[in-house]
Image (spheres, helix red, strand yellow):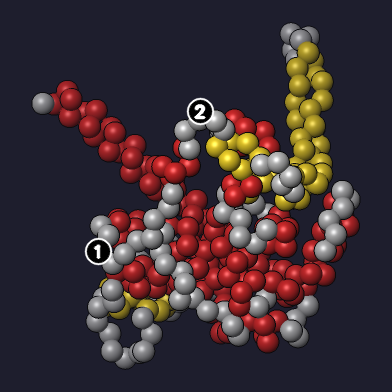
Amino acid sequence: MEITNNVAETIKTLEKEMTNIFNDTNYKKFLSLMSNFNNYSLNNLQLILIQKPDATNVASFETWKKAGRYVKKGETGIRIIFPIKYLKNKKNEENEETKEPSNIYFKVGSVFDISQTEVAKGKEDLLKKYKPKILDNNDPAFVEYIELFKSISQFPIYFDDFNNTKANGYCDFGTDEIHIKNSLPAAQKLKTIIHEVAHSLLHKDSDLSKELKEIEAESVAFVVSNNIGLDSSEYSFGYLASWSKEKDIKELKPLLERIHKTATNILKNIKSAQTKEKEVLVWTMYLKTFLV
């Protein structure tokens, strides 16, 4: 696919190419990109998938430079769409010249993946300190994440030893409750919670087919699980290729938009809850210095 400097043409071409996302390999790569770059638009995620599907951390040339890395000679940038905010001159009440935001325009520009960069000579590789880890069933972080999801879920979450269903959990829209099988290993329990929370956010009063609801909830679970360090290798979307063949852009794009929006909101809520926990901890420690 040729990516031109014309934003409208690029977006039009992306829509024509969208069905290519829906095979097991491409779809999992696309969801992984969504997990790593959840603040990027669907158009830009698709552009990265087409040009560098194994990308893990992208930034502009100048941003890498500020981070102490430089782009290797001969590397080709990944073309994405950038928003450009134009400022216009305006006089305030004191008749002073100020600038205020005007219209937002878009242009095609380049970013580079971390694999296309090297640490500048004499600089520390700070990114090594933030390398994500895969959580195992004995990790104490599971307890924290489960409690965190209980706090951000709009439905109460109950842990039961139910035997009336083969499912690991279910979202009951009659009672607005989420039920999770209590005997599950920690990792499976957390994945099931994420899946059912996705259902609660997406499918209250929804008239979508059961198949489509499961695709959405499982996709959101993949994005969130991958982001927080859960092993996502067992997820499979092989059935999507045949399912999507008879669909057009009017059906496929809203599906991806709902998944993207829901996963992004969950990740934002996680980050917000974690920030609040840290603030409470700092404040408690601060108070203790005066109470001892």
In the image as oriented, which residue stretches furthest toward the left?
A: 292
Name the secondary structure under disc 2.
loop
Q: Quadrant of residue 141?
A: bottom left
Mark 2 crowdedness (10 Å alpha carbons): few <14, some 14-19, many ≥20: few
Residue drawn at (72%, 51%) of the image? 78
Residue drawn at (61%, 60%) of the image? 54
Q: On the picture, is 230 further left or further right than 280?
A: right
Earlier in the chain: of badge 2 and badge 1, it is 2
Q: Quadrant of residue 284?
A: top left
Name the secondary structure under disc 1.
loop
- Look at mark 2 in the image and give the residue it sits on: 122
Amino acid type of the residue tagged 2 in the rendering: Gly
The answer to whether one can see residue 206 in this image is no
Looking at the image, is 246 positioned above or below residue 12?
Answer: below
**Percent from the top left, x then y, of residue 225?**
45, 64
- Look at mark 1 in the image and give the residue it sits on: 138
Amino acid type of the residue tagged 1 in the rendering: Asn
Residue drawn at (24%, 81%) of the image? 161
Looking at the image, is 273 positioned above or below residue 100?
Answer: below
Calculate the distance from the C-alpha at mark 2 to the C-alpha at mark 1. Answer: 38 Å
**Percent from the top left, x then y, of residue 144?**
30, 56
Residue drawn at (55%, 37%) of the image? 119
Query: Which quarter of the rendered picture does the N terminus lie within?
Result: bottom right
Query: Which quarter of the rendered picture does the C terminus lie within?
Result: top left
